[in-house]
Amino acid sequence: MHSGMNILSKLVLGGLLVLAGLAVWLLPKSRLVTGRISERLFVVTFVVGALCSAAGLAALFVLPGRVRQWHLWELAVMPLVVVYAYWIAVMRKARTSEIVDEKQNFDMTNASGLAWALSLPAMMVAFVLYEAGLFDPALWFPFYLLVTLLLHSTATLYFFKRR
């Protein structure tokens, strides 16, 4: 039997996915979208990514039994999905995937390499916790996704602000 929170979570997730899909479809036809990602939106995107991933990781460790049942890690990343839907709308309006400048692209590339390299020790920590009986094996994927997202978002902000 599904709990009320489980059903509510699914409804919220479904509603946000529909909203994101509508944004991708309708926004390029409006004046709300330009052909590039501004510096402000670039920073907001990665701040949202860092906050969403931190919230998801907190949920993994504070409410590990409820994370799967209530779809908490999916709910935690949904604001970022909506932001990336806007990025897709910008790509559709610009009719190209090159919507960030060279510096932003370089910063994201550097952050990607760093996030990958640091995700390996994070997974080793998860393995040690699992071996000690402190980590649910069903949470490996959400943990990896959220850790990588947190590392990538914070590293991108670091490289971007470093100039």
Image (cartoon, rainbow, N blue to C red):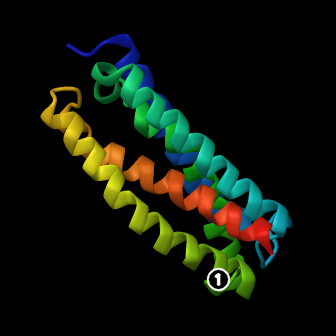
Which residue: 35% across, 50% down?
122
Query: Which residue corresponds to mark 1?
Result: 106
Which residue: 76% across, 72% down?
37
Which residue: 71% across, 77% down?
104
Which residue: 31% across, 24% down?
64
Q: Quadrant of the N terminus?
A: top left
The residue under label 1 is which amino acid type?
Phe
Q: Is residue 122 left or right of residue 139?
A: right
- Asked if residue 10 shows in the view, the reply is no
Q: Quadrant of residue 99?
A: bottom right
Which is more toward the observer, 162 or 105? 162
Which is more toward the observer, 131 or 142? 131
List x then y, in percent, for residue 75: 48, 35
- Asked if residue 17 shows in the view, the reply is yes
Q: Quadrant of residue 110?
A: bottom right
Which is more toward the observer, 85 or 74? 74
List x then y, in percent, for residue 7: 37, 21
Q: Is residue 88 above or below residue 70?
A: below
Q: Is residue 11 left or right of residue 69?
A: right
Which is more toward the observer, 37 or 127? 127
